[in-house]
Structure formats: C-alpha cells, structure tokens
Image: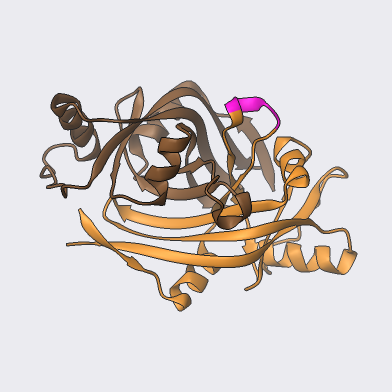
Chain colours: A orange, B brown
Amino acid sequence: MGTIHVLPDDQIEELLHTAIVGRIACRGDDGIGGGRPYLVPLAYGYDGTSVFAHSGPGRKLNLMRAEPRVTFEVDEATAPDRWRSVIAEGVFEEIDDPDQRLHALRALYPPPAPKPSLGPNTVVFRIRITSRSGRYEIPD
Amino acid sequence: MGTIHVLPDDQIEELLHTAIVGRIACRGDDGIGGGRPYLVPLAYGYDGTSVFAHSGPGRKLNLMRAEPRVTFEVDEATAPDRWRSVIAEGVFEEIDDPDQRLHALRALYPPPAPKPSLGPNTVVFRIRITSRSGRYEIPD
C-alpha cells in the first residue's frame, strides 16, 4: 500500500516520450462486447502534441472513425505500489498528407531505425492530445 | 514492423498471472471528458477466474457501479514490434463477504507480502472475466 500523488508536468512529458506502448479506449458502439469500451494496446510515437500510430483495417479504425474522441493511457510499474501513469483525452485524425505521414513515421520510428514499408491498406493516424493528467504511487 | 499472431491460452493465463498492472476501461457516461471511456491503470491480483483490486471512493467506482460491464487489458512490450497483450471482457462486482475479501487480498498481495490495512472507505472488488483473447507481435 502506498500513497498516490499528482505527477508533475515534466514527468508527464517524459513518460509520454519514453513508453513503448500505450493504450487507447474508444466507444464500442458497434454491438460487440455488450456496449463495453474498446480497449487496445498501441505502439506509438509522440512529438509533444500528438500520439502517432498506424493500423490495418479493423474494428479499431471503424470505431475511431465513428467516434474520434478517445482516451489514451501510458504507465510504468515496478511494484503494485510503485508506478506512474498518464491519462490523456484526445481526438483521432487520419493522416493522408505525405509530409505529415513522414513526420508521423519519424516520431514512431526515430532514426536510425529504418522507415517501415507500410502495406497499401495501412492507415497512419494521430491522436491529438487535448488534455492530460498524471498520477504516481510510492510505498508508505 | 512485425506480424501479429493469436496468443495461445497458456500464455494468456501466464500474462494475466504475472503482470503487475492492468487497465480497465468503462463507460464514461457522467458527462466528464465528452463521453470518452474512462481508462485507468489498476494494480491487480488474479486467481484464474477474476481480477481483484481495491479502490477508494471516486469516479472509477461511481462509473463501474453505474455500468458494471468493463474491459480489462494487460500487455508487455520490449520493442514496438515485440509485445504480447490480453484483452478481456468482465463484470465489476463489489466484495463485502469477509472470506471473499480475504481471498481477494491474498490474490493481490500473495504471502509473504503483509496483508494491507485498508482504510474504512476502501472498496474491494472483482472483475469477473467473461471472455478473453490475446495477441502478440514478433519482428518480421
């Protein structure tokens, strides 16, 4: 058992920049799962303003196109009472412009990583972050 | 870039048993956040059937009491194209019975960890898992 505190802004930014995988939750209004939210992990990049990712066709894209307002989360934990996390509200936006796609892919795969070859059906998108908050817990 | 596969049942169970923190998403129908789902990390225990956790009063409990059908997620990642994850559907249930509370706390804090002293307002609850599926990605 520990005590939960507010994570300072600089640590919010650090966690958003360093985590490998985050999660998005969006409304699951397609009749699957009894109305539960859709929740899925996402390898992502971050440029200080938006989260960038890509995806093939499927339920995730269908749901975000129908309702672009999503919640994004990252965390890191070393024990049940020693963790930090960020929860952000954001808006899903597809990226079609070639220059913006390049920016997104560079955030996702910073050099010297090779730029990936995306399939013809792959959608590149951003989650434009509109608000964020962080928490951390340390043992008593 | 890698290829995504279906995670076998034994690895689904292993990941549910070993992860420190999972995340729950529930409907955010209280007018906060523009109708976005509520998404929050959760230190948890698992007994093969249910996820156990506890929480003080707040938005998480209010929302799950209003709509007990939640989505639960765990993952582990070592690179953007090397991860595994489990997504489960479940039902929130508060635990009041003393024997069941002890079972829940033992799943959360396995011996030899000391049993925590919970505050008078702390709610112990389970997410009874009703379905689960897993995925993993490995580099091409």
Q: Looking at this view, is A114 or B65 the one in front?
A: B65
Position of B14 with respect to A138 (left or right) is right
Q: Looking at this view, is B14 or A138 the one in front?
A: A138
Which residue is at a point 71% across and 31% down the rendered structure image? A30
Q: Residue furthest bottom?
A: A10
B135 over B118 or under it: above or below: above
Which residue is at a point 16% across and 62% down the rendered structure image? A140
- Asked whether residue A109 is in view, the answer is no
Does the magenta run of residues contain B30?
Answer: no
Position of A69 with respect to A88 (left or right) is right
Position of A129 with respect to A67 (left or right) is left
Magenta stretch, residue numbers: A30-34
Q: Position of residue B124 (x, y in %)?
A: 26, 38
Q: Position of residue B26 (x, y in %)?
A: 50, 40
Q: Looking at this view, is A22 or B92 the one in front?
A: B92
A54 over A36 or under it: above or below: below
Q: Which of the 4 image quarters holds residue A115?
A: bottom right
Q: Position of residue A123 (x, y in %)?
A: 80, 49
Number of marks in the rendered image: 0
- Asked whether residue A55 is in view, the answer is yes
| Magenta region, main secondary structure | helix
Does the magenta run of residues contain A33?
Answer: yes
Position of A51 with respect to B66 (left or right) is right
Which residue is at a point 20% across and 53% down the rendered structure image? A1
